[in-house]
Amino acid sequence: MQVLDIHSHFFPKQWEDLQARFGGDDWPWLKHNGDGTAMVMKGNSPFRPIYQACWDPDTRLAEMDRDGLCGQILSATPVLFGYDRPAAQAEYLAKLFNDAAMEICAQGKGRLFAMAQVPLQDIDAACAEASRAKAIGHVGVQIGSHVNGRGMDDTATLTFLQHCADEEIPVFVHPWDMIGADRTANYMMGWTVGMPAETQLSIVSLILGGGFDRLSPKLKIAFAHGGGSFVFLLGRLDNAWHHRDIARGRSEHPPSHYLDRFYLDSAVFDDGALRLLVDKMGDQRVMFGTDYPFPLGEQTMGALIRNTEGLGEQSKRRLFVDNAREFFNLR
């Protein structure tokens, strides 16, 4: 059975000195340790340890072979987005890292694909870069869950999503700059608690903000990390919609009405959670994703789906490859 991972990340092995180009003292860069590992730095502060799978296609392909993957879709880590920078700088970053992603994919023996980043704080520039990225081979675009506090229901963001619908560019929403940062600063709770919460918030804001009612049904959009706790709390959302008018926002229908308008990845790390995800969303709306090659990703890629009881072979095939090929127009 073929296996295609839609949620994996990359860093180039090196890139230009952004501090020298733009000034400031908190730009991301890689501090290599000389042993195939590196530390992602923000200025002088350590941000995240990584290893050569992030930048070396041969290492990535070997680990894909180890776990039986036929392909991966790469996307930038949100620390590279630059949403908090002036738009022209974020546009420069997008082009820099989008081109770098394609260079890695070119060495991937036809098994690596990429999603682009865009300067989402400037919608005209974001639309232009999404179109350019598609033209040079990107199979979709990855955006953050908000732009400096403006959520998925923001008018400008909806304009960008409609552009993607019109140009048939799939969109993957990844959490970043998570809510509750002051209360999740310890124990990696920003990742374990904040990221799923941020993802759920982005889905709910798009629904209750009337986004799906305004956007073309041609839009292909997916959310990371199994949608956070969205499916677990779907009953609560529907109950609120039916019994409190202020809980309806601008949506024309209860949240459960929109389940056929988006996809979720399978990065939930628990077989019961995966069964719930498939039960609520259907096996045609979940795609295999690992968060490779990070420590909080699925360490044996594909093991969760393979070992989850109650998933038939047809469902596993849909999760592993069929849904992704359809979503990203890969044949």
Image (spheres, rainbow, N blue to C red):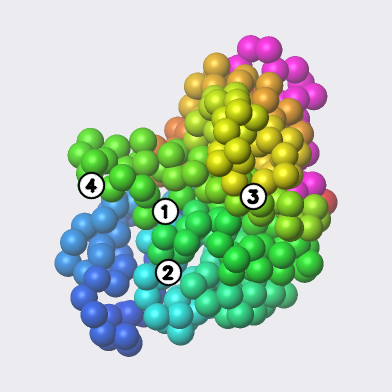
Query: Disc 4 designates what residue?
Result: 182
Q: Are marks 2 and 1 in contact (CB under 8 Å)?
A: yes
Q: Amino acid at mark 1?
A: Trp
For discs 2 and 4, the disc positioned in front in the rendered view: 4
Q: Identity of the amino acid at label 4?
A: Asp
Q: In front here: 280 or 325?
A: 280
Mark toward the start of the polypeptide (3 vs 1): 1
Residue under label 2: 83
C-alpha gap between disc 3 and disc 1: 25 Å
Residue drawn at the location 44% of the way across and 45% of the way down: 198
Magenta span dominant secondary structure: helix
Q: Is residue 129 above or below residue 224?
A: below
The magenta stretch spans residue 308: yes
Instruction: Name the residue tied to disc 1.
Output: 176
Residue positioned 48% across, 27% down in the render: 269
The local secondary structure at tag 2 comes to loop
Mark 2 neighbour density, 10 Å: few (under 14) some (14–19) many (20 or more): many
Most distant residue in the top direction: 309
| Residue 163 percent location from the top left of the image | 71, 69
